[in-house]
Amino acid sequence: MGTNTININIHEEQQRAEESIKAQGLRVLVCNGTGCIANGSNDVIAKFKELGADVSILTQHDKVTIVPTGCHGFCEQGVLVIIPDLNITYVKVKPEDVEEIVDSHIKQGKPVERLLYTSPQTGEKVYKNEDIEFYARQSRTTLQNCGEINAECIDEAIAKHAYEALAKVLQENNPEAVIQEIEKSGLRGRGGGGFPTGRKWRFTAANRGGKSYVVCNGDEGDPGAFMDRSVMEGDPHKLLEGMAIAGFAIGSDEAYIYVRAEYPLAIKRLRIAIKQAEERGFLGKNIMGTDFNFEIHIKEGAGAFVCGEETALMASIEGERGMPRPKPPFPANKGLFGRPTLINNVETLANVPDIIRKGADWFSSFGTETSKGTKTFALTGEVNNTGLIEVPMGTTLREIIFDIGGGIRNGKKFKAAQIGGPSGGCLTEEHLDLPMDYDSLIKAGAMVGSGGLVVMNEDTCIVEVARFFMHFTQSESCGKCVPCREGTKNMLKILEKIVRGQGEMKDLDTLEELAYAVKEGSLCGLGKTAPNPVLSTLKYFRDEYVAHIKEKRCPAGVCSALKVIKIDESICKGCTKCARTCPVGAISGTVKNPHKIDQSKCIKCGACVAACPFKAIKQA
Amino acid sequence: MPALTRDHSDWVKVDSIIDSFEAKKSNLIAILQKVQEEFRYLPEDILTYIGTKIEGLSPATVYGVATFYAQFSLEPKGKYIIKCCDGTACHVRGSMPVYTSLKQRFGLEDGTFTSKDGLFTLETVSCLGACGLAPVVVINDKVYPQMTTDAMKIIIDTILDEEHSA
């Protein structure tokens, strides 16, 4: 096979797209991701348009265009409005702020100071985008275009090099070279396991010839992770292009994207993107005039975490119960509808176009020895700056939490970070300088997983968190393997018992024994990893389990059955307010004398704590 | 609440849904999603019908699929479906007090999810992917960020006011 002639000059298309963007004049970027929509970004956009910012107004700019973009990642500060002329990000913008932005910033070039981001460390307003710590330390590649382009307009993606890599591989017409490039880049699966992507492609390509499929796993089920959602919503063409390149490399002409039903906006934007790409000849039949055909379908999930497991996901696409099956046969040999299937997750495929366009060496210049490239993390929980971030593999937890995340909110103490969702583990203070890559995390008893990173402070009860995850995996267990179905149930029972203060020391041994049985005896990743949160918290926070069992005390003061509410007699003024508020009459005392709580009657509702005007009542 | 006896137009609707997905076995989940959208739940007689109408399926298989996925409900759902996110981030930031307050307000006992007046269905979901805004509550696809029990009370009051004045 020689090189192909393609009927599209992608560079000309790019130039045209760039010109059409230039013609928009000043682009006011308003975040329109799920997070900002919830904060009212549609109203902000409507207000801008109402004020005429969408058409030319008498300003220093000939023209102003309001661009709804994908997620900037800084969801908590939404609605975000970015105006590139002064390189400024406005945070928490409300519709009533729009007029001031138009009058001051757009018309007179004067920034609106009160809407700037305030640094939690210095308490000062930040003028330049690159000075916001949250963005300053990131290396955004996969997420680069999210937040800069209008995801519903293909020209904006083309101006940012979309489909350039696809044009390149179609022109060179050498699938083997594509696979070699991906192998050389060192890209590993971003969905959890970290399996080398190039090797997976090679296995599937070995069955070239008959019908085969590419499947994109967009069933981002890990609670606390939303990077795939952001890519699908904010830069769908990057994913579609990655899938088409994968299809070309393995000789497949049909693909499915399996998206969670909880992501309606992602589904909508993907549908628009597929249609636009087909109209331009980047997807569909005879792509760019070659004999390569590639059709992408969208399948909506119906709410089952186990469908993140590849064999379960394929069963679900076939319209069946999403239950995993034993491997081998691997999907590369016998997958969807019994045909060879390549299955990769969203973030993995979104990395592909840049690797092809900029080269494997560019990609592998990021990261560590065995984990190349960048990784997105969904940074949430008790940090000052929550949101979606992208950093080189191997960045330490300390940099992520304290530099990008701006530290723990309300000046509290860092306790633990839960990484990898219900399959992952806890990282503690001793891991703060651990490089975050596949292998170091496995060694620490955790995993990268999809990249959910939930930060917990001293007020979080670790045992309760372990119970929470076990409750999750127990209810999501599909029930096929007995150790997973019954084991998780019994582990949950024990954890519930401990949280209620009825645990015994021997429960901890049973818990560990069950954990290993579930790990060993389960078919798929769900069961194999379900005990991880329990095992890692038992390892690092055993003393908290012991406190719940022996002292009947919850050190974080979370578990309501173990709460003790006390009145500090030195502060109490005897105003009787608490006694009148208590719904069960557990508080007694006379006017102007310190009151007392009868612990046998107290139901720990906390009503008295809220009612006390002197803050004399405390919960421990 | 939808009528329990089904008239002809219901079956026409079901037929047109099945046809729009080419009566294909692999489209079963999508068909069930559309049926649920139409009827607000999956009535058992319709499940049986789908199982006999599509080649390669049996009523038992359809029932199996319908009961496997969390999204499907075999009971009628309320007019307002309230989804409290209880993903990790929401959980850590206090989603459970919000859920409990709603449960008490609707007078729901353990194991029941729809209020007696058929107006509200209360569910938990594991993650809506809006973790930066935790805790999140979704009412009929509208996302309410950073919820508290007080804010929730106002939102429900507003819905009830609209319902009564309508």
Image: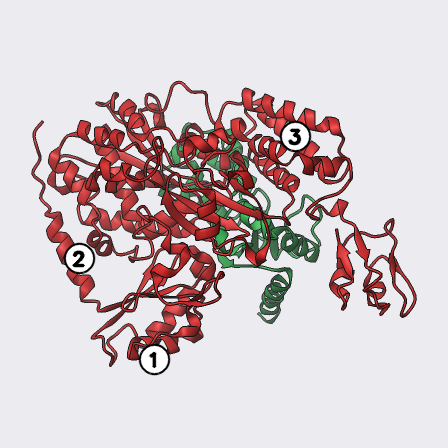
Chain colours: A red, B green
Image position of A507 (left or right of B19): right
- Residue that lies at the very extreme toward the top in this rendered image: A328
Q: Looking at the image, do the residues carrying marks 3 and 2 touch, with CB atoms under 8 Å apart?
A: no
Which numbered disc flags the more N-terminal residue, 1 or 3? 1
Disc 1 to disc 3, C-alpha distance: 61 Å
Check the residue under mark 2 and report the chain it is in: A
Determine which residue is flagged by label 2: A17
Label number found at residue A491: 3
Q: Amino acid under label 2?
A: Ala
Measured as percent of width and height from the top left, residue A176 is found at 19, 27
Which numbered disc flags the more N-terminal residue, 2 or 1? 2
SS at mark 1 in the image: helix
Q: In this picture, is A599 found above or below A109?
A: above
Measured as percent of width and height from the top left, residue A322 is found at 47, 31
In which quarter of the view is residue A330 placed?
top left
SS at mark 3 in the image: helix
Q: Are marks 2 and 1 on the same chain?
A: yes
Label number found at residue A386: none
Disc 3 to disc 2, C-alpha distance: 57 Å
Determine which residue is flagged by label 1: A103
Which numbered disc flags the more N-terminal residue, 3 or 2? 2
User: How many C-alpha atoms fall within 10 Å of the one at disc 2: few (<14), some, or many (≥20)?
Assistant: some
